[in-house]
Image (cartoon, rainbow, N blue to C red):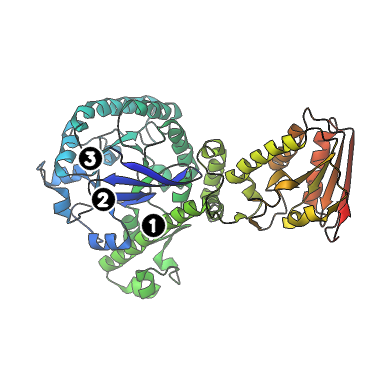
């Protein structure tokens, strides 16, 4: 059946619709973990906050009902999508559970789960390679074992991808996944990495799995329920998440924020306008009975998760997910490291990232890190293709080095430019492009922050691109023009370009044009 429909892409993140027997889930989505017996936040409130799907533990439900199959939707009073975990988390924590794979698979069918999971063996972070290998092999055996039991089911079935932190085992699990018709893949065992804020390690592992898994199916990352890491995982292609963090944090008095968590007793003001934070002050929250305080903080945490998911979706729709990552990466050192992992995967991300969208807004160049925005680099590659055509049969090249938007009206100021000259613009973030494209997206449609420095690797990259486009061309002279007020950045770019071209071009001259002239000759 057609169950997953992708509507929007940005980076490798996507807005999609997963169809289940009890409704449609729009991805990216976080499943709140619900205890089948104890619900600190009632399900009516969970739904009103904006969550139309929950996850609960089929193994715990099985134990509490002594194996008797009772309809899960009726028992919980929830007429929307329910995902059930099989007990894999208990295996991770306790080493084993008192039920086998076939039993729990059949039980999830009989209680009416909409999305179900086979009983896997999580590898966690403490296993030796040999132990993790055995866990991967046993999970695969169980995946095959379950197939005859689920092929007649109209439920969606989830295959956990185990093997982390061992990349070879993780790759093996991901490649095998192509052989079996599971609807959803789930990256397992990240709990310890999340607790330690080792987000970069988690992203490295998820990116490896995502590259190798079938791209048309959703990827669930177990145990992720903090807003600060969500946009980074979405950018690499993760679609679904689940966590009990909203209630676990609340029991510890921890208050979720996009950039981390703070204990309520450390706050002076509640920096949120959800119904809880609008109604109570910090002092009033702390004076409440413990049970009520926990419930209210949990409600705030759910609002924060929902807000972040909506922010991510809107960023995808507008084509601003990269800008969101740039912003979030400045909030915490662990997120800065996570951003570096995203940048390492730009070759993969560019497979899915659209160059433009209908009604796409102006692109934001926040600082030099914006150079790595994959949309800019994709547009630049196409611009370089145009340059190769323009440079045919050109004897001279004029390169304007700019660090702001001053190039937009530059074309109208140039006089006496003969047909033997090609005019290029070099910008420390936008890159290299012909002046003929200055009035196109994103060169004409961008807003700049502070760009006063660039990494050496970016400087080398810009110079290398100019060198490559002049390969096998008949260019004899290059005129480097530092346009606008001189700066160390512009001078550094000019010197690097001169250095890479000195063996290729017989004549290179550098000069400055202030930019205040109404017109000038080149």
Tell me the residue at 14%/53% (across/down).
75
Front-lying residue, 137 or 491: 491
Q: Earlier in the sequence, mark 3 or mark 1?
A: 3
Q: In the rendered image, which residue does mark 1 sit on?
A: 305
**Any part of residue 167 in sight:** yes
Q: Earlier in the sequence, mark 1 or mark 2?
A: 2
Expressed as whole percent of the image width and height from the top left, the position of residue 145 reads 22, 26
Front-lying residue, 68 or 440: 440
Residue 179 in which image quadrant? top left
Residue 278 in which image quadrant? bottom left
Left or right: residue 456 compared with residue 264: right
Q: Is residue 481 above or below residue 515?
A: above
Distance between the alpha carbons at the discs numbered 2 and 3: 12 Å
Secondary element under disc 3, as helix, strand or loop, is: loop
Distance between the alpha carbons at the discs numbered 1 and 2: 21 Å
Q: Are marks 2 and 3 in contact (CB under 8 Å)?
A: no
Left or right: residue 234 compared with residue 70: right
Tell me the residue at 46%/48% (across/down).
197
Tell me the residue at 36%/43% (across/down).
5
Tell me the residue at 44%/38% (across/down).
206
Badge 2 crowding class, 10 Å Cα cut-off, few under 14, some 14 to 19, many 20 or more, is: some
Q: Earlier in the sequence, mark 2 or mark 3?
A: 2
Q: In the rendered image, which residue does mark 2 sit on?
A: 23
Q: What quarter of the picture does the N terminus occupy? A: top left
Tell me the tag on residue 155: 3
Secondary element under disc 2, as helix, strand or loop, is: strand
């Amino acid at each position: 059946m057609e169950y997953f429909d992708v509507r929007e892409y940005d980076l490798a993140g996507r807005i999609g619709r997963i169809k289940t027997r009890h409704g449609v889930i729009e991805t990216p989505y976080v499943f709140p973990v619900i205890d089948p017996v104890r619900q600190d936040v009632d399900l009516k409130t969970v739904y009103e906050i904006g969550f139309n799907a929950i996850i609960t533990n089929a193994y715990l439900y099985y134990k509490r009902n002594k194996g008797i199959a009772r309809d899960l939707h009726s028992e919980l009073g929830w007429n929307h999508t329910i995902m059930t975990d099989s007990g894999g988390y208990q295996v991770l924590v306790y080493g084993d559970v008192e039920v086998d794979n076939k039993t729990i698979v059949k039980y999830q069918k009989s209680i009416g789960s909409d999305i179900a999971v086979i009983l896997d063996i999580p590898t966690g972070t403490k296993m030796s390679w040999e132990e993790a290998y055995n866990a991967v092999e046993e999970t695969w055996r169980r995946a095959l074992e379950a197939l005859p039991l689920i092929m007649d089911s109209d439920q969606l079935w989830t295959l956990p991808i185990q093997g982390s932190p061992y990349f070879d085992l993780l790759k093996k699990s991901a490649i095998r996944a192509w052989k079996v018709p599971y609807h959803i893949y789930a990256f397992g065992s990240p709990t310890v990495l999340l607790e330690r804020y080792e987000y970069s390690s988690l992203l490295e592992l998820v990116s490896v799995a995502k590259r190798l898994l079938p791209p048309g199916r959703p990827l669930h990352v177990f145990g992720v329920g903090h807003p600060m890491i969500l946009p980074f995982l979405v950018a690499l292609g993760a679609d679904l998440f689940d966590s009990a963090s909203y209630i676990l944090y609340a029991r510890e008095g921890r208050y979720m924020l996009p950039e981390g968590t703070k204990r309520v007793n450390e706050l002076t003001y509640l920096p949120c306008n959800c119904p809880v934070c609008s109604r109570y002050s910090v002092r009033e929250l702390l004076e409440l009975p413990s049970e009520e305080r926990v419930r209210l903080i949990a409600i705030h945490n759910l609002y924060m998760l929902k807000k972040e998911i909506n922010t991510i979706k809107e960023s995808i729709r507008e084509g601003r997910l990269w800008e969101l990552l740039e912003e979030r990466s400045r909030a915490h050192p662990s997120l800065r490291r996570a951003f570096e992992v995203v940048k390492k995967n730009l070759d993969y991300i560019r497979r899915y990232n659209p160059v433009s969208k209908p009604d796409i807004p102006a692109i934001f160049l926040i600082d030099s890190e914006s150079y790595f925005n994959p949309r800019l680099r994709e547009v630049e590659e196409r611009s370089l293709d145009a340059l190769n055509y323009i440079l045919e049969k050109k004897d001279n090249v004029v390169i304007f080095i700019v660090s702001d938007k001053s190039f937009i009206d530059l074309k109208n100021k140039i006089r006496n430019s003969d047909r033997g000259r090609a005019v290029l613009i070099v910008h420390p973030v936008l890159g290299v492009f012909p002046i003929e494209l200055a009035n196109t997206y994103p060169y004409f449609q961008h807003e700049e922050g502070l760009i006063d420095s660039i990494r050496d690797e970016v400087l080398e990259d810009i110079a290398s691109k100019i060198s490559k486009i002049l390969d096998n061309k008949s260019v004899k002279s290059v005129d480097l023009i530092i346009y606008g007020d001189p700066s160390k950045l512009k001078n550094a770019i000019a010197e690097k370009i001169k250095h890479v071209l000195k063996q290729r071009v017989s004549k290179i001259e550098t000069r400055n044009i202030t930019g205040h002239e109404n017109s000038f000759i080149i």
